Amino acid sequence: MGTRTLALTVTLTLGLLAPAAPAAAADPLELEGRGFGHGIGLSQHGAQRAAGQGVGWKEIVRTYYPGARLGKVGGAVDVLVSADDDGDTRVLARSGLTLTKVGTTKRWSLQRLDRRAKQWRVRADDRGRSVLQARRGGGGWRTSKRFGGDAEFSGTGPITLVTPEGRTDYRGRLRSASADDSGTDRDTVNRVSLEDYLRGVVPQEVPALWDPDAVRAQAVAARTYAAFERGEPLASHYEICDTDRCQVYGGASAEHPASDDAIRATRKKVLVKGGEPIFAQFSASNGGYSVAGPFDYLPAREDPWDPFTWSRRISVSDLETAFDTVGDYEGIEVVERDGRGAFGGRVVRVTVTGSEGSSTVSGDTFRIRLGLPSTLLREVP
């Protein structure tokens, strides 16, 4: 009896001293979703599917922008070249290239100034004056002209701009534009006709070899967007940017014959309301239900043309990095949806829970932190 009691005591004691079994590690987060981008206005994937079903570009744009009608615009647009961020505007030398003092009739033939030049640049001196310099081969820069005010390069055919990221051809004019009153801070701005601008935008936004009516619909939306932005310029020295903050623009280097055809087929066509170009937002996909924009021609509505779906597997380490205040990741809970579309709608608020607490964020914050295509999503059951 005493022996059995001792054995039981030892067993109990050892049991109390043994470490607790570790908690089971959380599984990676498996998500499925629909849509890509903000989902406002024209859906590019929806337009492509509609065109494949025989829907023409006019019906496509009227469906995505209800209440707007077709009109016409022309003119030029001033585009910030964001990759040229080193303060000068540098181009390759070629015949027919000229430099103009902006706002005047003063113009110089660069070939006459220096026939041996391989590159030209305009930069600002410490007094805000434009300094024109030439470089022959790999040597240093030689100053040719110095004058007050901004300056721009022009010529027949595209001009090759040299930036810290490489070389890109642009149609129209390339301006060394003052970004402030002092004139010492300069940006490179491409002043180009609206139609030539589109040639560098449309194939950047959709594949040029998509169905022609889908590409034409994109051309009308992009032209309208740019025309609207001219009335709401981003800065005093340019109207629109060249990144996805506005529309992606790659200059003449991005042009494609098929998208050029779509631009010609819709020449000068824009969507208007009240006689003015509308804010023609667009995204890659709305996932079957568009998101309401800031105007009545950008409604939230079901889209039978857009079937785009996606899936993602998010590792525990990525979740813990994205939500570093919750400790060891345990799970998520969707707190609120907007009620429109699949899964009960887009995620409005979501809570991420871990060993040290939880974090409730907006659906957009959740999407951005995890690099997800959209907020129209759910955890895979």
Image (spheres, rainbow, N blue to C red):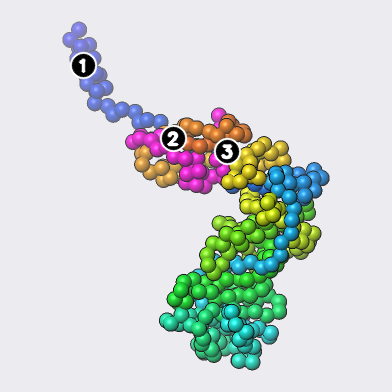
In the rendered structure, which disc, 1 or 2, sits on the residue that comes first in sequence?
A: 1
In the image as oriented, which residue stretches furthest toward the right?
54
Q: Amino acid at mark 1?
A: Thr
User: Residue placed at 59% from the left, 79% from the top?
Assistant: 103
Position of residue 81 measured from the top left corner of the image (x, y, whole percent): 57, 68
* Residue at mark 3: 376
CA neighbours of label 3 inside 10 A, class few (<14), some (14 to 19), many (20+): many
Assess whether residue 363 is covered by the magenta stretch: yes
Mark 1 = which residue?
A: 9
User: Which quadrant, please, contains the N terminus?
Assistant: top left
Quadrant where the C terminus is found in the figure = top right
Q: x, y percentage for residue 64?
A: 69, 45
Asked if marks 1 and 3 touch (Cβ < 8 Å), the reply is: no
Query: Mark 2 belongs to which amino acid?
Result: Thr
> Of discs 1 and 3, which sits in the foreground?
3
Residue 248 rendering spot, x and y as whole percentages: 61, 60
Residue type at mark 3 is: Leu
Q: Residue at x 58, y 79 (%)?
A: 102
Residue pointed to by mark 2: 351
Secondary structure under tag 1 reads helix
**The residue stretch that appears in magenta:** 353-381
Q: Residue at x 74, y 59 (%)?
A: 72
Q: Secondary structure at mark 2?
A: strand
